[in-house]
Image (cartoon, rainbow, N blue to C red):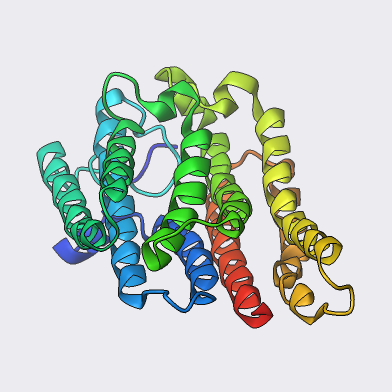
């Protein structure tokens, strides 16, 4: 059914809706895990973590604003779409206003990044530029990543490896194998959010040539992808713990068990996966998207807590 006309709302609430607040938590998990890994180092810088957090939050905000306006202009967001309200499509703001908000969000991210560049050097310039350009290119420009089926790769790379390893780097000035290893489940749980979104929007995406993996390969493919992502993330701490046990004294296992806190989410992962396989009804997939975002956030909290307890 077409979306109903939006009820009048204040400007503050309007921009809050446009920011897609349910998705903003996506940046929290990698920063918690990267920060927890960095806190094991005596030289960890807490101000750097705060700047990285704010910078990542503004990049996510700018990306959401870019998606709102570019999806509308490409015809992906229409009255046929069944999902959370999109501000430009609903007529809450004009495309020009959304572009201004997008530029402002990326400008604030750049301001945060300036401090990090001063602290850690020029490599962060390239990371910041790539993050912002990718946020715009996800749905905008001549080669929109989300329209070419590359959205999953984008999320895995930037919300997994770049965010987790980048957080560790800005706090310590170094890179580590541990931050690379923990980037995998962080990116996986975040990509699972996108999978639900793409499954829900399959029918409208195909009409405008948005070739997500769901459109390219079908519902069964992305359901299998979702299962691999969420259960793979659950299994990952077990693999890391096994690696520790094989390389250290078997009698020193107290810190190993702390790494397994994300396993408490196994039952939750089963319920999420069962729901995704049971329906394509947007009325069910919309709350499932939010539940998957919560899964991603809680996973990061549990993993970070376990890392801190273990050390």
- Whether residue 25 is visible, yes or no, is no
In this orientation, which residue lies closer to the viewer: 122 or 242? Answer: 122
Asked if residue 78 lies left or right of residue 220, the reply is left
Nearer to the camera, 82 or 218? 218
Q: Quadrant of the C terminus?
A: bottom right
In-front residue for pair 205/307: 307
Residue at image location 63% in from the left, 38% down from the top: 280
Q: How many marks?
A: 0
Work out whether 294 lies above or below 212: below
Residue 218 on image: x %, y %: 65, 24
Residue 276, image x, y percentages: 68, 45
**Residue occupying image coordinates x 44% and y 45%:** 158
Where is 283 relative to 52, above or below?
Answer: above
**Residue 216 position in % (x across, y down):** 58, 19
Q: Quadrant of the N terminus?
A: top left
Give the residue at x 70% y 67%: 262
Give residue 167's position: percent from left, percent from top.
42, 61
Toward which corner of the image does residue 260 lie, by quadrant? bottom right
217 left or right of 5 in image: right
């Amino acid at each position: 059914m077409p979306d109903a006309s939006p009820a009048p709302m204040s400007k503050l609430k309007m921009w809050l809706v446009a920011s897609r607040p349910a998705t903003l938590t996506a940046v929290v998990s990698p920063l918690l895990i990267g920060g927890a890994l960095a806190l094991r180092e005596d030289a960890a810088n807490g101000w750097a973590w705060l700047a990285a957090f704010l910078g990542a939050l503004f990049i996510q905000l700018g990306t959401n604003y870019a998606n709102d306006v570019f999806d509308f202009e490409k015809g992906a967001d229409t009255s046929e779409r069944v999902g959370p309200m999109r501000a430009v499509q609903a007529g809450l703001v004009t495309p020009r206003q959304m572009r201004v908000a997008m530029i402002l969000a990326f400008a604030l991210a750049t301001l945060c990044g300036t401090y990090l560049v001063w602290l850690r050097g020029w490599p962060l310039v390239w990371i910041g530029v790539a993050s912002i350009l990718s946020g715009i290119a996800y749905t905008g420009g001549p080669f929109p990543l989300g329209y070419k089926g590359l959205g999953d790769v984008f999320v895995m790379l930037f919300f997994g490896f770049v965010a987790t390893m980048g957080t560790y780097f800005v706090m310590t000035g170094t890179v580590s194998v541990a931050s690379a290893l923990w980037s995998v489940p962080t990116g996986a749980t975040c990509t699972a959010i996108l999978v639900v979104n793409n499954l829900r929007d399959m029918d409208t995406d195909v009409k405008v040539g948005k070739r997500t993996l769901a459109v390219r390969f079908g519902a069964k493919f992305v359901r299998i992808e979702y299962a691999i992502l969420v259960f793979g993330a659950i299994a990952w701490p077990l693999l890391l713990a096994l690696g520790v046990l094989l390389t250290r004294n078997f009698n020193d296992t107290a810190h190993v068990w702390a790494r397994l806190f994300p396993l408490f989410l196994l039952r939750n992962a089963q319920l999420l996966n069962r729901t995704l396989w049971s329906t394509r009804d947007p009325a069910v997939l919309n709350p499932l998207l939010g539940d998957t975002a919560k899964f991603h956030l809680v996973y990061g909290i549990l993993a970070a807590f376990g890392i801190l307890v273990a050390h």
